[in-house]
Image (cartoon, rainbow, N blue to C red):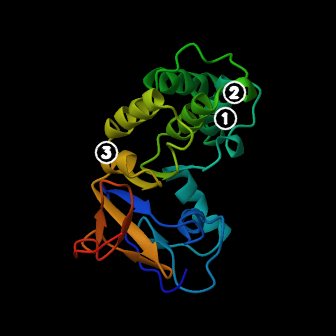
């Protein structure tokens, strides 16, 4: 990324579309303090964040869904995975379990508590990974390719779930139909910079690029 300037405000629902290697996932990791930028500043919740300790509050208030669900799921059972986050935030085991059960029910995964995590289908893993994030009651969601590998029914289910969340959301996705149904604005990245949706036009034949409103050929 180079001279990137990006602002996310309370209540925003923004989709980010760009080619592989353009820095989308890197942006998420910088916002969470998992990667340090070589230059510039990172300001989250009105405060500049520099050191590891500065990002502890960020990780309590922002939920990051990784691109690969297996990077997020590490416990033997679904309940243990989903309860881990609330326990890590200081909740008692009983309260964490209650939060996990409520979250699973909200996502239509009631009865999954004792399922073995690594034996779940790809779509089930994606939803359980989302449950691990939502169980911590974040204010902001950063979702990295949340619809990747989902079948049509599960994808529609996820769209409905996201549209019923009263959260600030930033979504990375290559699927324009999905992102157009779940966000208010779609941005892209080029040369390390974010282009706002006034400059981006999403076509029905599934791609986006600069100057899309100008007549052109393919």
In-front residue for pair 96/143: 143
Q: Position of residue 154 (x, y in %)?
A: 47, 29
In the displayed structure, would residue 76 be above or below residue 26?
above
Q: Sequence-wise, which precedes: disc 1 or disc 3?
A: 1
Would residue 66 appear left or right of 147 to someone viewing this image?
right
Nearer to us of marks 1 and 3 is 3
At x 55%, y 41%, the residue is: 133
Is disc 2 in contact with disc 1, using a CB cutoff of under 8 Å?
A: yes
Q: Position of residue 199 (x, y in %)?
A: 28, 75
* Label 2: which secondary element: helix
At x 47%, y 45%, the residue is: 138
Image quarter in which the N terminus is found = bottom right
Residue 46 shows in the view: no
Q: Which residue is mark 3?
A: 181
In-front residue for pair 37/138: 37
> Which quarter of the figure has residue 118?
top right
In the displayed structure, would residue 205 be above or below residue 160?
below
Which residue of the protein is positioned furthest toward the front in this rendering? 218
Q: Which residue is mark 1?
A: 84
Disc number for residue 80 = 2
Nearer to us of marks 3 and 2 is 3
In 3D space, how far apart are the residues under numbered discs 2 and 1 (Cα atoms)? Answer: 6 Å
At x 64%, y 65%, the residue is: 53
In the displayed structure, would residue 7 be above or below residue 11?
below
């Amino acid at each position: 990324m180079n001279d990137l300037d990006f602002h996310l405000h309370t209540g925003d629902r923004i989709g980010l579309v760009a080619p592989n290697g353009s820095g989308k996932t890197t942006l998420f990791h910088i916002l969470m303090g998992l990667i340090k930028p070589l230059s510039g500043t990172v300001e989250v919740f009105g405060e500049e964040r520099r050191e590891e300790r500065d990002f502890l509050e960020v990780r309590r208030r922002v939920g990051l869904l990784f691109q690969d669900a297996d990077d997020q799921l590490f416990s033997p059972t679904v309940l243990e995975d989903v309860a881990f986050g609330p326990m890590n935030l200081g909740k008692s085991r009983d309260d964490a379990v209650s939060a996990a059960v409520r979250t699973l029910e909200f996502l239509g995964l009631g009865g999954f508590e004792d399922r073995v995590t690594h034996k779940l289908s790809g779509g089930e893993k994606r939803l359980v990974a989302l449950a691990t994030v939502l169980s911590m009651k974040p204010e902001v969601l950063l979702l990295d390719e949340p619809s990747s590998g989902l079948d049509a029914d599960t994808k529609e289910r996820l769209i409905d779930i996201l549209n019923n969340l009263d959260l600030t959301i930033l979504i990375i996705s290559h699927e324009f139909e999905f992102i157009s149904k779940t966000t208010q604005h779609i941005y892209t990245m080029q040369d390390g910079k974010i282009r706002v949706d006034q400059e981006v036009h999403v076509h029905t034949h599934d791609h986006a690029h600069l100057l899309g409103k100008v007549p052109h050929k393919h």
